[in-house]
Amino acid sequence: MLVAQQLRVKGRHYDLVPPLTIEAAVGSLTLAVGDLQPQRTALALTLSARMKPSDGLVSWGQSSKFKHLRRHSALIDSPTVNEPEPHLSVKDLVTEDLALIPRRYRGIRRASDWLTVNSFEDIADALVEELPAARRLELLCTLALANPEVDLLVVDSPDRRGPHPQNWLPQLQHRAQDEGRPLCIVATVAQVPEDWQGRVIRIENPTAKPEEPSSEGAREPASTLEAPEPVTGQLTATQYAAAEPPAIEENSPNQPLTAPLTPLHATDSSTAQHRATPAEASEKQPEEESQELR
């Protein structure tokens, strides 16, 4: 039995797979429905042990070891992960996949022999992209089951190959309930078929992570900032004219010892003292000396 408890896959901006619990037994087909392709692929990769979950536990049988799940599972036709290259021929694809099977399980090593034994010789020379959806899925599942240790098939978005569930649903049901080799199959799909009555698991839509508030305080807009005070203590002409002189109380220790200077333009000419210039002083000096001699 496949058991996933609180399985979670984190993305860059949101959880690709929010916490999810799955139980799928051998002999059953389970559909996991997700609206987004990255969701479906992330779940398929995790259930097949091609990617470790961010949180939670995935176990197969009595073991929760990652290698144990990887050895007994197979990922089928995952977009951009292991879907066959469209330019490959069926024979080349079989050659590559048979080489990945452990050596001790390689019963048939030649691709042509394998194609004949498994009734695919009619499409040996065809390109993979030319195959009908049902035939393509049959080929990929049969190749995965060439490894006898595989008991779990995880099929990624088989419904993307066409709108008709008949291309994939009856085939997966038959393989899961095969009496000779029952399997546990999980298929990720974008929509549940109308006539499906089996088990369905819904992958919740991801939600963006809320942005954490910054530890720094919010800055005010530039328009509301006050202008910085001048660096120097000198007043401009406009500020000096607008400033009021400080009021000085009588007998205040801060009162100036001398009266304020009076501007020259406001002084009476009769009381103004005249200072002699150097030229006038040099003319008066000889006159004073002659008077003293007299």
Image (cartoon, grey):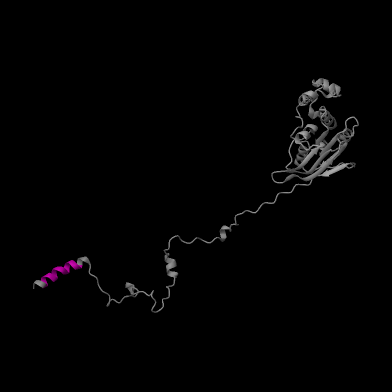
Q: Which of 98 and 92 is in front in this view?
A: 98
Furthest residue in direction front, as rendered: 62
Left or right placement of residue 146 versus residue 291 in this view:
right
Quarter of the image where the C terminus is located: bottom left
Residue 56 point in image, percent of width and height: 76, 43
Q: How many labels does the image show?
A: 0
Label the magenta part by its dominant secondary structure.
Answer: helix
Residue 276 placement (x, y as % from top left): 22, 69
Q: Is residue 294 left or right of residue 47?
A: left
- Can you see residue 116? yes
In this view of the protein, which residue sits in the foreground, 65 or 157? 65
Question: For the view shown, which residue lies furthest in the left direction?
Answer: 294
Q: Quadrant of residue 160?
A: top right
Residue lying at the far bottom of the rendered structure = 250
Is residue 287 on the magenta stretch? yes
| Magenta run includes residue 232 | no
Q: Can residue 189 be seen in this view?
A: no
Image: 56 above or below 116 = below
Position of 75 relative to 56 (above/below): above
Can you tell which quarter of the image residue 150 is in? top right
Residue at 11% x, 72% y: name it: 292
* 101 up-or-down from 6: above or below: above
Residue 20 spot, x, y in % from top left: 79, 45
* Residue at image location 16% in from the left, 69% down from the top: 284
Of residues 46 and 161, the one nearer the viewer is 46
Quadrant position of the N terminus in the picture: top right
* Residue 237 image offset from top left, x and y in percent: 42, 66
Q: Is 273 positioned to the left or the right of 65 in the image?
A: left
**Residue numbers of the magenta segment:** 280-291
Image-quadrant location for residue 236: bottom left
